[in-house]
Amino acid sequence: MKRVITTTVINQSGVLNRVTGLLMKRQFNIESITVGHTEQAGISKMTFVVHVEDQRKLEQLLKQLQKQIDVLKVNDITDKAIVTRELALIKVLSPPGVRSEITSIIEPFRATVIDMSKNVITVQVTGDPEKIEAFIDLLRPYGIKELTRTGATAFVRENQKAPAQQLSIL
Amino acid sequence: MSVNVKHQEAQMIGGELPKEKLQGSDVFIQSLQNEGVEMIFGYPGGAVLPIYDALYKNPIPHILARHEQGAIHAAEGYARVSGKTGVVIATSGPGATNLVTGIADAMMDSLPLVVFTGQVASAVIGTDAFQEADIVGITQPITKHNYQVKKVEDLPRIIHEAFHIASTGRPGPVLVDIPKNISNEVFTKSEIKVKDLNLPGYQPTTSPNFLQIQKVAQALQKAQKPLILAGAGILHGKASKEFVEFVEATGVPVTNTLLGLGTIPGDHPQFLGMAGMHGTYTANMAICEADLLINIGARFDDRLTGNLEHFAPNASVVHIDIDPAEIGKNVETAIPIVADAKEALQALQKLEIGQLSIDKWNKHLNEMKENYPLQYKRKSEKMLPQEVIELVHRHTKGDAVVTTDVGQHQMWAAQFYRFNDADNWVTSGGLGTMGFGFPAAIGAQMAKPDKTVVSFTGDGGFQMTLQELSLLQESQLPVKIIILNNQCLGMVRQWQQTFYEERYSESLLPSQPDFVKLAEAYDIEGYKVENYEDADKLFEKVFSSNRPALIDCRVEQMENVYPMVAPGKGLHEMIGVKG
């Protein structure tokens, strides 16, 4: 199952390596990982999307992360009301003949054209990972020349509908 | 790099500094003194020259091993027996990488170590400089935490944190990598301030949740067949006394993990013997039959559980551990308790559970103990390794500190040297390191100079770290090395016999050094014995002497460790049970 996990970490050199090394050592598959500063100086936040087999594996992952000295907080936010955003840059082949067709796809996704040459346009799209998947699928038939994604970053919404499942035993 | 570093080298070689000035290496020594370090195990080299220069006046005794691996295993033995943090120093590059096995070993067996490695100067880190190795990267998965010092002002704080992290919570090794320019750097005393610990990401839970403790008491009162599995968490928590009191107050039978041996005396009437792959019939069957299994400070290692599908099939599991990540990792747990063993046992004792009415269960287990004891039978003139261990037990009155490597001799020592104290047992459990036992014995003897220390080793394992005979000779510690010499890698051979149709691939060692002459080359008394009577006489002499000795005991080659749970099998599927 796919889980979205956020960790707050002390921004020391090697901390990203420590966390990804731990995931590798314990045989977890990372789909994406993002890191960046938070509102507090010296504190960073990582968001990663991982695939785990079952509940026990998931609990292991959370506990092993929590054990790291530089990790302050670990949250599995998958089952909470969350906002998730990702950014993708896509270079699409767009000879003049199909350019307007492509533009009509871009519009409903609220993507923007950020660079243009004779036969190629570069599009930027943001949104939750599913939206980006859908957008890429629609552009693929025109020929994607290059593609890069940032990976998801996520926040828990201020208003939660139902209490989230308690995993920790502490 | 060049100008700056040359300037500093000049300062170092130049000698005396003005009084208000300090060098990084002096700060290093002061920090160790603040932590109460009694001795350092190490080996010098280029990147730690400033540190060794500061050690020259002997502010803290330094034990010079003959290989970095010897130094770290000795530190492990010291830490295990003294309950204090072992300290190791090695140089950069090969010095650091030679420590890797010991660090991994300490990580698996939760031993508190602070390991200092030299590093090339900050300016050249990352350029593949002479004797550079990324030891922080290399040891990341095998340390509890590690550091590289970036600024000399950080050194006192980092050292203080390292000792705190290594010795609290679930103990483990912490590595501190110190670039040479940092230990060379000169600055004024006022620049150093040790601040209070500030580790917001490290707050180990030691007090148990009271509601959970109550649940354990209720479960105990309901249980018909309760069983306690006692692990090394009890000895790390220094809770053996509380543990035995609790066990006696309730009457619950006890089994041990390999590393938990001695937490209850080996001849205690409630003790069923060790459980697991080479555990006793009674202990393993008790796990299979129990309806309540209370694990205190053990991690349900695969060598203990056998096939998890068949592990404790009838039991509801209570798991008390200081490391939350161990709970539920391998075995589903009904009542999880994150706590220090001592605090958990004290909380349980306060509930005054009283003697449980489990006479029928205890009677059943006692019958099993009588009917299926551990046993061996000599078939030829050759003495058996088990006999040697029992002989040593007799000559040391069961009160020696015993160290081992891994393999057959380790299992026989675990089975037949009935430990009366957890601090008497030093073995490489989780990592299973050949070459561990002999240097560990030297460290153990340094921690307890008045104890008899015996290093049981095999002819294979001993050859991996035998260079420490030089350290033994130099220190004149009365360590007794007992080589159970079967001229093979016994456990490998046993598995090849059992699972690979007797294809003894590379496991026989017919060509060996003359161990007696080897000992003599190091000016240590060496003996060779080939039969039981001679061994008995020799041990009489050797164990009454306060000099080190090496005894090459020629034992039966084809003897196997039994009972045995084959890999992939359940605990109830033991082979080699003799009734």
Image (cartoon, coloured by chain):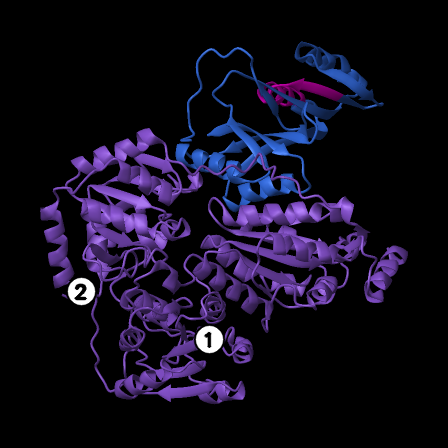
Q: Are marks 2 and 1 in contact (CB under 8 Å)?
A: no
Please report the bounds of the magenta region as a residue range. A123-139
Q: Look at the image and give the colour of chain A.
A: blue
> Mark 1: which secondary structure?
helix
Q: Position of residue B244 (x, y in %)?
A: 27, 51
Q: The N terminus of chain B is located in which quarter? A: bottom right
The residue positioned 70% from the left and 26% from the top of the image is A143
Say which of B385 and B32 sits in front. Answer: B32
Spatial CA distance of label 2 from label 1 is: 30 Å
Residue carrying label 2: B373
Q: Position of residue B219 (x, y in %)?
A: 22, 35
**Residue B196 visible to an observer of this rendering:** yes
- B129 lies above or below B312: below
Residue carrying label 1: B462
- B113 lies above or below A99: below
Horizontally, residue B502 falls left or right of residue B433, namely: left
